[in-house]
């Protein structure tokens, strides 16, 4: 897609922008929203004051104090930088979107607007921004649609590439499920009358821009809970450090404010504290990159919790259309003859079913496509009345269609249907296929077996989902027989056949009653109640405005399988937070081993036994811990933005894996990191 | 929620349960214990020559060379059974180390040939420990034997006979009841006063 | 360390293992008001109590009413105990004619016994009349234990039920716990202890004539009936100053075993009740396993450290070698009949629980041996823990563990089908905050004051810090054991430790009940393979890590200036 291009993590433009934003974020009012980083800022201010005091007093040997203060400020800046980076990525995408929102002129209709059946209606030209809800505008070929709305009259092809990135135009028409249009898209041909459905600033595009920029970011429930946990931990460590001073005084080893602040900053969870909002923004960003627009972060989190996925059969589980799978010839008919006739009848049939017959005939019998124009062929298109299609060619009348329709055709020509044809038709129906009978005037030839083709790899996808504890339910209008056979082939956990919107609603309610979260996709107006009821309702962008309003996400690609991606993104978002929290807390062990012996070794040289890293001097030990603490934030920015690697496995296995990497790793990594920094700063004679 | 009502219940509940648990229960248990285990319930007091000389399970102070001495006691002025206490001195306490040094020096003067068992020079928890470890009792055998004009081997045998094994063969530690051992000493090798 | 020592520890753990399902199942039945074999005797007593007090046993309470009822009961009974101490000189059953207890000490003691702490700033045999001991102190041993268990049951109900506002009736839980869970065992246990030599009488102190010294006054009293509830209710307040080291409280290794068994039995059983009532017994066992692991780690450290002994005393010429005839190791402040293994085991058990009974002085332990009880307490006494208090304490840690685990598997965290949301995390963090706040702040103030703070110390150097830290940890954690060299019977310590006990108890309980209420109102989410299971060894080890990290990381700086540096200094032979 055009705007959500894959940005590299260290995209120079974004890094530059982030670096600029960093300072602005230092304002205490901004900082107070993030208690962990706020504490670091207060600590840095404290050491700065102490440093100035020491400098004016002309105390010698301030190298250590200066460096500690410097790195503490750097810690604050790095934490801000992480957030600014995430916001910068969002802004980069928003800028592209904004280009689509260029100021345009709208033709607002005056007087009775509907039913004239023509585009010659009186209108006035007004700026698009002055449009209000329920205004009706006329949009002609080549013009931008000025606002989100619903087509009340007309049909047009629309270029929606500005928001979807898909360059092929789509058809939008009044009535039915394809009536919603988005402001900023362009009408290519024909004209439409659009009733505006949103006030300026609240249009789809505006919401999208706001979301990716993080401007409207509200903390999600889990984020709030995690923030409380982090704030609690910060208070606990604050207590531990503040009360350490009396203990140190009792022991005859009072500590300087530099050392105490250094210890505090190292202990409080600055890593996750600094990266937390970046993780949230990045999660939304990942969603946008996959062309999904969520109305809130809450919805993204809910996606991670989903127990049950309601999936539409068509398009999600099966390829959109049925395909010819077999030619079943009647007794006395050569299979090749049947294939030839079927192909002939389908040559002009541009439906996917028709094309698939041509393809199968070629694959099985090497029957090539023929150029029929010169043979004076007359095509008989499918109509709702005849319910068959075919071709008249050199006196031959080849037809294909439903069994009863072909039966009438044969009978009308004086022929009769053989008994065993009915048996074949029934067998195919029972197996979940669609029988298409082929006949030539009085002579039935056989049956084409049309089959739903389950998408490649979908079964594996469902297995993954099952491992993650997610149940898949296939929703289809097919009869139970057909549904069961496809369900079995696709490997879904359950199916609902002959499903009406009310059935869907009931199913969702039942699942929710049992405490399960449900996700579904939908596009039609009659899907709207279910979309609203579902915990995660993904509306197709191609769907009606009602559906888009009811759901809490919109898939711009209108791809039914997107639901699975959304669930994964939701999970990844939570996992990243959990993993970095664990990592952050686990880091404390090593920091204690670096700082505590350093603090008290002057008074109690025996405490150097705890200096397991063999850090050179007390100053270098404390400095190394502080530097490590600052650098690790930057080092983990890519992880925060990309999210931790996601694998489909059971919760138990997933937890074991993440505990090993981020828990055990979180204990070990800082031991190594601090030691290396100690070696470096000792070599540079910094401490 | 009715706070007044719950307050009333709280008062009545305190009264009712105090009667049941604070009076009926302990008094009934006293009556039953006195009936079934009169000796145990009253502290296993030991009579000699018509006088109560102590409790079988409460240590008492011995200082004469002819008696086995119990462990150092921090209860009152030493083995004050109305003031049970330990020293509560920590492992790096100078007072503790000095006390142990003094005790070790005194012990080594009596019996230079054997290492000084730790329990003989450290205070018990209650200050009323009625026991010594077998090693601590045996360590004192030379002094007691000399004072009682008995052979050291005989005294050691007497100690050996008074070693209480672990309960059920595995609970607790082997030990010697000092009062019982000393009463046996008096029985076997009376000191003429 | 000896093989026999380990055998005793092992037998002890097996006994606790064996009793867990028995007591656990029994408690489920009692609190679900199902029939038990004791009903014919106890049901009439129960009914008459409800009649006398006006309790409507069919009425369930919202968590706030439950909390209010609990607070009112604690408040009223605490006031009664305060008054009883102040007027004991005019009351009967006072053969030693003890006078009124001073106001600060009476407040401290009333707070102490009401909060199930049983911190003793007084010396029992020289301060309290027999009536005060029986009807005041021993009574609170029952009452505070029953309150604790009732709260744990209320919490478990909150997890087990769905979409309900009430979490049970406090008064009913209190009475049923007392009658069914506490009293029957105490009746049997009293007699068992008397058979071992624990005294049970109302006679005045005996004055005897020892054979080699002048005079000895032997304190007596109704000890056994108080001794058994002291352990069974994880109270810990000794009849005598020397607590369970006193031969009249704990005369034989068997009585010692019974007392240690009584300390952990109910709390271990509650893990099973947790599993039983929530329909996930495996979860109960996973919690049990995590606790047993921490228990073994603790007892191993203490036993190892005490058996290793004190190198300074070795240098002074004392022989600390363990042989068949000599205990060896660090015997300062330990009884001969218990030796190292039983002292190490008792110290671990009593601080794993919030009991605080001691059969040896933790103050005289080696630094690392003494650090384990201290760490056990600051971890929140959740290794089986105090009756009830251990259960609701560990549930707070479980909530936090599940929260972190839930995030790491990419779901909104759930605990047994209950979503853990910001309100629950908030309350859990409040509960967790109480400990460091009270302990570290009050210790910090005390160590800075040479007059009211440091004057009470009996040990100098790092050990002095440990003494004060232990005092506030023990008070806040409602343990009651002490580094008893600290003279805590001063106005400052009586007041501050008294407050610490009240805050540590009730500021822990109220957030806990709030979580119970919040969980009880929630839907129960059906489990799936995407839900992180709370029944596995992985969960148990995560729980262990969270307990250690939240507890130990907070106190590591303080510990490093106390026991840790003292250990290193001791190895270098330094004394203070």
Image (tube, coloured by chain):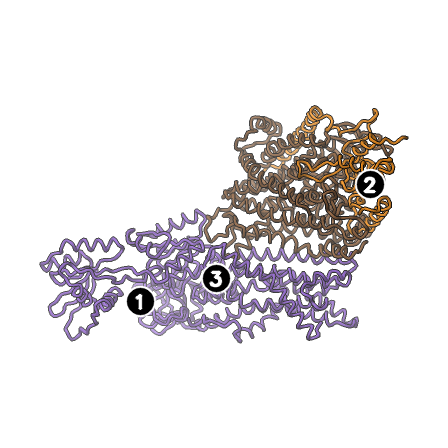
Chain colours: A purple, B orange, C brown
- Taking depth in this image into account, of A649 and C569 the one nearest to the observer is C569
Is the Cβ of the residue at disc 2 closer than 8 Å to that at disc 1?
no
Q: Identify the secondary structure beneath mark 3.
A: loop
Q: Which residue is mark 1?
A: A155
- Say which label, 1 or 3, has the lower sequence index: 1
- Taking depth in this image into account, of C348 and A122 the one nearest to the observer is C348
Residue A92, percent across and down?
49, 72
Q: Are marks 2 and 1 on the same chain?
A: no
Residue C393, percent across and down?
61, 46
- Per the model, the C-alpha gap separating discs 2 and 1 is 114 Å
Label 3 crowd bin: few (<14), some (14–19), many (20+), radius 10 Å: some
Is the Cβ of the residue at disc 1 closer than 8 Å to that at disc 3?
no
Q: Identify the secondary structure beneath mark 1.
A: strand
Q: Is residue A546 visible?
A: no
Closer to us: mark 3 or mark 2?
Answer: 2
Q: Which residue is mark 2?
A: B140
């Amino acid at each position: 897609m055009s705007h959500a291009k894959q940005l590299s993590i260290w995209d120079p433009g974004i890094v530059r922008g982030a670096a600029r934003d960093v300072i602005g974020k230092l304002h205490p009012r901004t900082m107070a929203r993030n208690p962990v980083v706020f504490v670091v800022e207060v600590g840095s201010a404290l050491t700065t004051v102490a440093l100035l005091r020491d400098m004016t007093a002309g105390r010698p040997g301030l190298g250590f104090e200066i460096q500690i203060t410097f790195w503490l400020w750097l810690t604050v800046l790095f934490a801000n930088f992480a957030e600014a980076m995430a916001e910068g990525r969002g802004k980069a995408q928003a800028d592209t979107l904004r280009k689509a929102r260029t100021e345009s002129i709208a033709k607002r209709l005056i007087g009775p607007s509907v039913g004239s059946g023509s585009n010659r209606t009186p209108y006035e030209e007004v700026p698009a921004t002055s449009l209000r809800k329920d205004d009706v505008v006329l949009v002609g070929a080549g013009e931008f649609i000025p606002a989100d709305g619903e087509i009340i009259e007309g049909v047009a092809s629309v270029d929606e590439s500005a928001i979807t990135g898909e360059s092929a135009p789509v058809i939008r028409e009044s009535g039915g499920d394809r009536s919603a249009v988005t402001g900023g898209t362009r009408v290519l041909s024909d004209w439409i009358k659009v009733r505006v459905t949103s006030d300026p600033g609240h249009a789809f595009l505006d919401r999208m821009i706001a979301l990716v920029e993080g401007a409207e970011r509200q903390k999600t429930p889990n984020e709030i809970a995690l923030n409380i946990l982090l704030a609690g931990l910060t208070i606990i460590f604050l207590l531990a450090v503040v009360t350490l001073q009396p203990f140190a005084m009792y022991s005859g080893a009072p500590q300087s404010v530099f050392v105490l602040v250094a210890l505090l900053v190292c202990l409080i969870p600055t890593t996750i504290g600094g990266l937390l909002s970046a993780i949230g923004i990045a999660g939304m960003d990942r969603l946008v990159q996959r062309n999904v627009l969520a109305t809130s972060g809450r919805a993204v989190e809910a996606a991670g919790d989903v127990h049950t996925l309601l999936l539409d059969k068509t398009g999600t589980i099966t390829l959109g259309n049925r395909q010819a799978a077999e030619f079943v010839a009647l007794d006395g008919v050569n299979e090749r003859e049947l294939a030839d006739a079927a192909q002939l009848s389908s040559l002009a049939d541009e439906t996917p079913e028709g094309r698939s017959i041509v393809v199968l005939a070629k694959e099985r019998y090497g029957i090539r496509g023929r150029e029929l124009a010169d043979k004076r062929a007359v095509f008989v298109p499918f109509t709702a009345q005849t319910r068959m299609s075919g071709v008249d060619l050199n006196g031959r009348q080849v037809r294909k269609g439903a069994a009863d329709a072909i039966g009438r055709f044969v009978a009308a020509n004086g022929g009769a249907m053989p008994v065993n044809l009915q048996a074949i038709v029934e067998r195919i129906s029972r197996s979940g296929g669609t029988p298409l009978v082929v006949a030539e005037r009085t002579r039935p030839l056989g049956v084409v077996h049309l089959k739903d083709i389950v998408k490649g790899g979908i079964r594996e996808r469902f297995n993954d989902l099952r491992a993650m504890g997610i149940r898949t339910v296939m929703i289809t209008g097919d009869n139970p027989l057909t549904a069961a056979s496809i369900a079995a082939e696709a490997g879904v956990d359950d199916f609902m056949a002959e499903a009406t919107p009310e059935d869907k609603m009931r199913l969702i309610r039942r699942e929710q009653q049992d405490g399960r979260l449900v996700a579904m996709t939908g596009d039609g107006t009659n899907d709207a109640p279910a979309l609203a009821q579902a915990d995660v309702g993904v509306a197709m962008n191609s769907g009606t405005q009602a559906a888009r309003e009811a759901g809490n996400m919109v898939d711009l690609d209108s791809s039914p399988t997107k639901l699975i991606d959304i669930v994964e993104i939701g999970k990844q978002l939570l996992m990243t937070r959990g993993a970095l929290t664990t990592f952050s807390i686990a880091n404390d062990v090593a920091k204690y081993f670096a700082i505590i012996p350093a603090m008290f070794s002057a008074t109690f040289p025996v405490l150097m036994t705890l200096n397991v890293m063999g850090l050179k001097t007390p100053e270098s030990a404390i400095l190394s811990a502080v530097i490590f603490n600052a650098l690790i934030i930057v080092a983990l920015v890519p992880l925060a933005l990309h999210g931790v690697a996601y694998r489909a496995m059971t919760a138990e296995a997933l937890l074991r894996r993440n505990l090993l990497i981020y828990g055990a790793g979180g204990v070990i990594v800082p031991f190594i990191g601090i030691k290396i920094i100690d070696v470096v700063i000792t070599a540079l004679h910094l401490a | 929620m009715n706070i007044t009502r719950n307050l009333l219940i709280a008062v009545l509940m305190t009264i009712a349960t105090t009667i049941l648990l604070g009076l009926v229960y302990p008094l009934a248990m006293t009556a039953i214990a006195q009936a079934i285990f009169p000796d145990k319930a009253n502290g296993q007091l030991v009579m000699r020559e018509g006088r109560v000389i102590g409790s079988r399970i409460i240590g008492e102070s011995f200082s004469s060379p002819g008696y086995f001495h119990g462990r150092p006691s921090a209860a009152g002025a030493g083995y004050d059974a109305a003031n049970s206490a330990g020293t509560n001195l920590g492992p790096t306490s100078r007072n503790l180390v000095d006390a142990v040094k003094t005790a070790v020096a005194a012990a080594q003067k009596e019996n230079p040939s054997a290492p000084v068992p730790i329990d003989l020079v450290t205070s018990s928890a209650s200050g009323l420990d009625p026991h010594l470890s077998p090693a601590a009792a045996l360590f004192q055998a030379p002094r007691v034997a000399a004072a009682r004009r008995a052979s050291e081997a005989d005294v050691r045998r007497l100690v050996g006979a008074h070693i209480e094994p672990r309960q059920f063969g595995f609970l607790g530690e082997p030990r010697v009841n000092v009062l019982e051992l000393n009463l046996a000493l008096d029985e076997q090798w009376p000191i003429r006063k | 360390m000896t093989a026999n020592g380990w055998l005793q520890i092992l037998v002890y753990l097996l006994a606790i293992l064996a009793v867990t399902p028995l007591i656990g199942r029994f408690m489920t039945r009692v609190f679900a008001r199902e029939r038990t074999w004791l009903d014919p005797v106890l049901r009439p007593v129960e009914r008459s109590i409800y009649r006398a007090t006006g309790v409507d046993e069919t009425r369930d309470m919202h968590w706030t009413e439950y909390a209010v009822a609990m607070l009112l009961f604690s408040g009223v009974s605490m006031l009664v105990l305060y008054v009883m101490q102040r007027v004991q000189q005019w009351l009967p059953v006072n053969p030693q004619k003890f006078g009124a207890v001073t106001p600060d000490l009476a407040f401290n003691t009333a707070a102490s016994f009401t909060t199930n702490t049983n911190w003793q700033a007084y010396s029992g045999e020289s301060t309290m009349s027999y009536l005060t001991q029986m009807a005041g102190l021993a009574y609170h041993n029952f009452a505070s234990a029953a309150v604790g268990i009732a709260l744990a049951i209320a919490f478990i109900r909150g997890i087990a039920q769905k979409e309900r506002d009430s979490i049970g009736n406090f008064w009913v839980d209190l009475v049923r716990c007392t009658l069914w869970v506490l009293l029957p065992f105490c009746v049997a246990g009293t007699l068992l202890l008397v058979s071992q030599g624990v005294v049970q009488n109302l006679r005045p102190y005996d004055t005897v004539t020892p054979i080699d010294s002048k005079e000895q006054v032997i304190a007596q009293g109704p000890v056994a009936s108080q001794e058994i509830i002291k352990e069974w209710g994880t109270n810990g307040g000794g009849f005598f100053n020397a607590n369970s080291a006193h031969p009249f409280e704990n005369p034989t290794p068997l009585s010692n075993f019974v007392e240690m068994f009584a300390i952990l039995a109910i709390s271990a059983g509650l893990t099973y009740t947790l599993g039983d009532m929530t329909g996930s017994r495996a979860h109960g066992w996973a919690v049990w396993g995590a606790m047993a692991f921490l228990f073994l780690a603790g007892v191993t450290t203490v036993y190892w450290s005490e058996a290793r002994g004190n190198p300074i005393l070795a240098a002074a010429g004392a022989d600390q070698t363990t042989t068949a005839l000599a205990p060896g190791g660090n015997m300062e402040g330990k009884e001969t009949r218990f030796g190292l293994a039983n002292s190490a085991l008792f110290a671990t058990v009593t601080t794993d629980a919030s009991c605080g009974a001691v059969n040896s002085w933790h103050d005289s332990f080696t630094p690392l041996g003494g650090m384990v009880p201290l760490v056990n307490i600051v971890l929140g006494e959740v290794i089986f823990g105090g009756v009830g208090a251990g259960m609701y304490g560990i549930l707070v840690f479980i909530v936090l563990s599940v929260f972190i685990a839930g995030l790491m598997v990419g779901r909104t965290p759930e605990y047994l089908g209950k979503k853990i949301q910001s309100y629950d995390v908030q309350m859990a963090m409040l509960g967790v905050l109480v400990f460091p706040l009270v302990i570290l702040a009050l210790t910090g103030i005390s160590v800075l004051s040479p007059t009211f703070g440091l004057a009470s110390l009996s040990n100098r150097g790092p050990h002095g810090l440990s003494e004060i830290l232990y005092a506030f940890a023990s008070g806040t954690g409602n343990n009651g054991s002490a580094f008893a060299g600290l003279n805590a019977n001063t106005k400052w310590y009586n007041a501050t430790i008294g407050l610490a006990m009240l805050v540590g108890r009730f500021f822990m309980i109220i957030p806990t009940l709030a979580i119970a209420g919040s969980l009880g109102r929630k839907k129960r989410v059906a489990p799936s393979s995407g839900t992180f299971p709370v029944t596995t060894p992985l969960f148990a080890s995560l729980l262990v890590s969270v307990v250690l990290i939240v507890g130990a990381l907070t106190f590591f700086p303080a510990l490093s200036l106390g026991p840790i540096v003292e250990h290193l200094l001791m190895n270098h032979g330094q004394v203070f």
